[in-house]
Image (tube, rainbow, N blue to C red):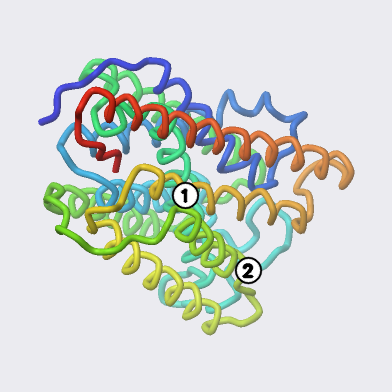
Amino acid sequence: MVPPRRNICAIITLFFVAPLVAEYLLGDLPLKMLGALIVLAPAYGGAAVLIRETARRTGRGWPTMLMLGTAFALIGEGLVSQSLFNPDYMNKHWHLLAPAYIPALGIGGWWTLFMFNLHTFWSMGVSIALVEALFPAEAETPWLGRVGDSVVALVYVIGSAANFAIGFKQNQFVASHAQLLSAAVLSVLLIVCAFLIPARGSRMAGGRVPSPWITGAVAFVLGTGAMHTQPKWGWAAVGAMLAIDAFFLALVAWVSQQAGWSALHTLSLAAGGALVYGIRAYTAKPLVGGLLWMRISTTVFLAAAVWLIGLCARRIIRYARLQKNDGLPVDLS
């Protein structure tokens, strides 16, 4: 167990960065609806804090956090919003379940995998990586004690309940008992599997690592590919997303074990993902409000993301210099 280094500022930052990435940078909500953070932050931010804290407290890293992010996706979309099972989610007549529909489960293969990608890699992964980069000295240690974790867990439950109530008021949809039970059991199994992943071992000696610019560019290209798989392709879209996910995870798993991997590389992956969201938002149709207001909002949030990425990079570089001046090994992964 890793002892915590109290950092309430980092906790608060992650609490709000997660929903801002998940809903606003993506282009789902405009700037004028920042008030929605009152229900979005407890759900997204609470989950991001819990995922990061439990992984770091037990000495685990990104494999555990990504697995927990997948569990969050299933809880959020299968039990809270229930969009995985709703044939007319948000009453928009989008037919989200039609592409690659699986009758026995009552889900759409494309929509389910798409939601897992959004929440695992972006809502949780990008948000946690960005905020950890802001605080490089404490990036691998817990920021809260157990009492704090319990408070955040309660906030997350309350936020999830509020989001369920809002969603139910919109269309009064409730999935079948079998679907809800299956989602709940699978969520628990994902959480258990996350903690069966061994704690991180030492890195391999030697080995060449591309520059952070290259790893960031690869993350951007792969993220763009995943985000633009077309539902009309049906099972071909599912296969394309799975191929992109497998390639990305295998590549990162290999290259991050090399001795030259650094905190700037981890940041580059988050930066590539954040830019994918911000740029994609320019092509998305607004869910609420007019097109002009949404484009203004997108510009503001993308500019904020670029500024945050730059600030993260400067902090990592500054911390690395301090370590070097103190004669300490520079390992910011």
Q: Residues within 10 Å of mark 2 (few under 14, many from 20)?
A: few
CB under 8 Å between discs 2 and 1: no
Number of numbered discs on residues? 2
Q: Nearer the viewer, residue 320 or 299?
A: 320
- SS for dot 1: helix
Give the numbered dot on residue 228.
2
Name the quadrant of the C terminus. top left
Residue flagged by tag 2: what amino acid is it? His
Q: Nearer the viewer, residue 81 or 214?
A: 214
Considering only order in the chain, which callout, 1 or 2, is on the residue closer to the N terminus? Answer: 2
Where does residue 215 sit, x and y in percent of width and height?
A: 45, 59
Q: Quadrant of residue 154?
A: top left
Residue flagged by tag 1: what amino acid is it? Ser
In the depicted structure, whether residue 41 falls above or below residue 96: above
Q: Nearer the viewer, residue 185 or 123?
A: 123
Give the numbered dot on residue 268.
1
Q: Nearer the viewer, residue 268 or 55?
A: 268
